Image (spheres, helix red, strand yellow):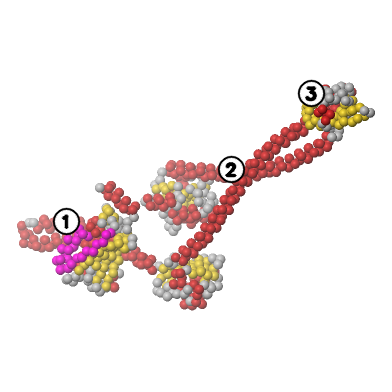
Amino acid sequence: MKILIVDDRKENLLALEAVLKSPDYHLVFASSGEEALRCLLKDDFAVILLDVQMPGMDGFETAKLIRARKKNEDTPIIFITAIYHSSENITQGYSLGAIDYLFKPFNPEMLKFKIEAFVKIHLHKNKVRKQNELLKQHALKLESMNKSLERTTSDLRKAEALAGVIGETSINSVITLDAWGNVINSNPAVLEMFGYEHGELLGKHVSVLFAEECSYLPNLKNSPIICERSKIPEAAAKHKNGRIFPAEIQIGLASLEDQQIFVWSVRDITERKQLEKERIDRYKTLETLVFERTSELFQTNEKLKKEIFERKKIAKQLRETSLKLTNILESITDVFFTLDHQWRFIFVNEEAEKYWLKGRDELIGNNIWDLFPEARSEYYLFNKALKNTEAAHFEIRGYHTDVPYEVHAYPSEEGLSVYYHNIFERRMFEKEMARLDRLNLVGQMAAGIGHEIRNPLTTVKGFLQLLGGKEEFRQSKGYFELMIEELDRANSIITEFLSLAKNKTVDLKPLILNELIENLFPLIQADAMVSDKEIKLQLQDVETLPLNEKEIRQLILNLVRNGVEAMSKGGALTIRTFMEGEEIVMAVQDEGCGIKDEDLEKVGTPFFTTKENGTGLGLATCFSIAARHNAKIDIDTGSTGTTFFVRFKTPTEKSVQRVEEGVMKTG
């Protein structure tokens, strides 16, 4: 029995081999998902042990491809992982058809018992499959027996006809009687049939040859039955030794010299009666078999009707699927078109018409290189894919725009299927990810050095406070206070610096963004009034969000203070909240001079600032807080001012429920 073990680490394979090694199993090892799929093409496995985290194709992708094969759709899969412990990972594993999800380190004995159970199940399935094959063979044998019985019945009919011909000749006992039923003569067959010699019956009444219940035999002359009927189909004949056997009597009447002579042809029908009984039994058996066969044929006919109905249904579904596929190709936002081997357009969707700036009636049937000779730079890659029958993937700039596209060309019997995917947003996302990576690096640095810096700051501040309180340093108290203020300022910078080191949001609670802003409004308004500036609120109804109150307060204060500092006296800063699709948006809009184009991409980078006394950590902290709340910050700037949009995703019912449960537990 074969077991497939998939893990990219050799030591894990050796450990599993040590646990599962048994003369009853044949262990097959694979170090990647691709190698595991090749093994499944060659052999049948009772169970598959599959590591989740692997380079290239991970365990989830491998399991999905395994389940796609008809042969392996029921093969048991056990996921083994040391990292992916979250409920989402476990749910994903079970949704892909896993029957178990184990965490490392695992219990070896429990694993052995589970493997033994799945091997037994596999053996049982094989046994059931073999039994089904035997049942099919048995059905064929029964059908053969049915035909044999039909031939036997036909042969029996022929044998009966032949026996009748023979019975009318020498095998019948022929007895000649006078009008009173006395034996006048008999043929030699009487000896074999009744056991009497020829001379023993002469002059005796014929009744000695029949049982007493044959009451119509003693007086033949007055018996209307014998006189009127020419045949007695069945009579109880009696052998000399007393044995009773059935006989058929054929009666003939002749007149000789005014004397009536009766000729009886007696046939022993014991064998015929036996054959009739056997024939009746066989007929009943055959009738039973015919009934069963008819029932099977009826069921088969019903199944055939259902199959025809299902096939019609499938054909309808295929037509609908084809229509849906066409609708999907027409509705996708990617450019899709197909070319034949002569580079002529076969199909184009609406996006392809927009891309080429031509209608499909101008494209279909025409050569792509004749219509668009400027696009011949892509000819080599298309031609390579078509000749080598291998998919080609490359990037280009748009034919009429400078937008980047990712091209996928797939060869087929008809020609080439091509689609262009707009990757402009992906490139922007990659840039954003690079920025977040830099932010994460700074955060890691903050976590490493922040603690070491605060320790000496605490010591210095403590000694300054101690010395400043002594009488001999009273004249220098102002210097001590200035040094302590500078240390507090350094500590606040380190506090902001350390906030970048957080990698996840903690203590989320269901909060309303408007309430947080209204609670901060007096403080914000007081700061603005000092510098002769105004704060306006335009708050619309928004949904409840899972937020960390302290971090969101810090985000709002940082954005507002940056906006206030960017304005001259008399300026107004507006804080707005509103719903935009499935997003909850907070906008902080100032009336400053805007952000320069060369500085816009650097905004949010740690230590980048345009202020004289700025640390460059305020906006970096805002971007970090937004990332921890699964939100993003967009910037709209110009000569009349700058607006920071903080876009929060609308929470699902499940996420809100999880946050409320967390609040109840912590509360």
Relative image position of residue 437 (x, y in whole percent): 32, 62
Where residue 258 sits in the image (x, y, percent)?
A: 92, 28
Find out whether residue 538 is within the magenta segment.
yes
Q: CA distance from mark 3 to mark 1?
A: 143 Å
Residue contact between numbered discs 2 and 3, judged by CB atoms under 8 Å = no
> In the image, what residue occupies the spot 76% across and 39% down?
156
**Residue, disc 1:** 459
Quarter assignment of residue 521 = bottom left
Q: State the residue in front, 531 or 61.
A: 531
Is residue 522 one of those drawn in magenta?
yes
Question: Label 1 amino acid?
Answer: Thr
In space, the residues marked 2 and 3 are separated at their CA atoms by 63 Å
Q: CA distance from mark 1 to mark 2?
A: 85 Å
75 up-or-down from 605: above or below? above
Image: 400 above or below 147: below
Residue at 33% across, 53% down: 653
| First in residue order: circle 2 vs circle 3 | 2
Q: Is residue 209 visible?
A: no
Q: Any mark on residue 215, and which?
A: 3
Q: Is residue 203 left or right of residue 141?
A: right
Q: Farthest residue toward the right? A: 257
Q: Residues within 10 Å of mark 3 (few under 14, many from 20)?
A: few
Determine whether the residue tagged by mark 1 lies in a helix, strand or loop. helix
Judge from the rendering whether residue 506 lies leftward or rightward of residue 318; answer left or right: left
Q: Is residue 114 above or below residue 273?
A: below
Q: Where 53 sits versus 327, above or below?
A: above
Part of the protein shown in magenta: 517-542
Residue named by callout 2: 131
Amino acid at circle 3: Ser
- In which quadrant of the rendered view does residue 549 lie? bottom left
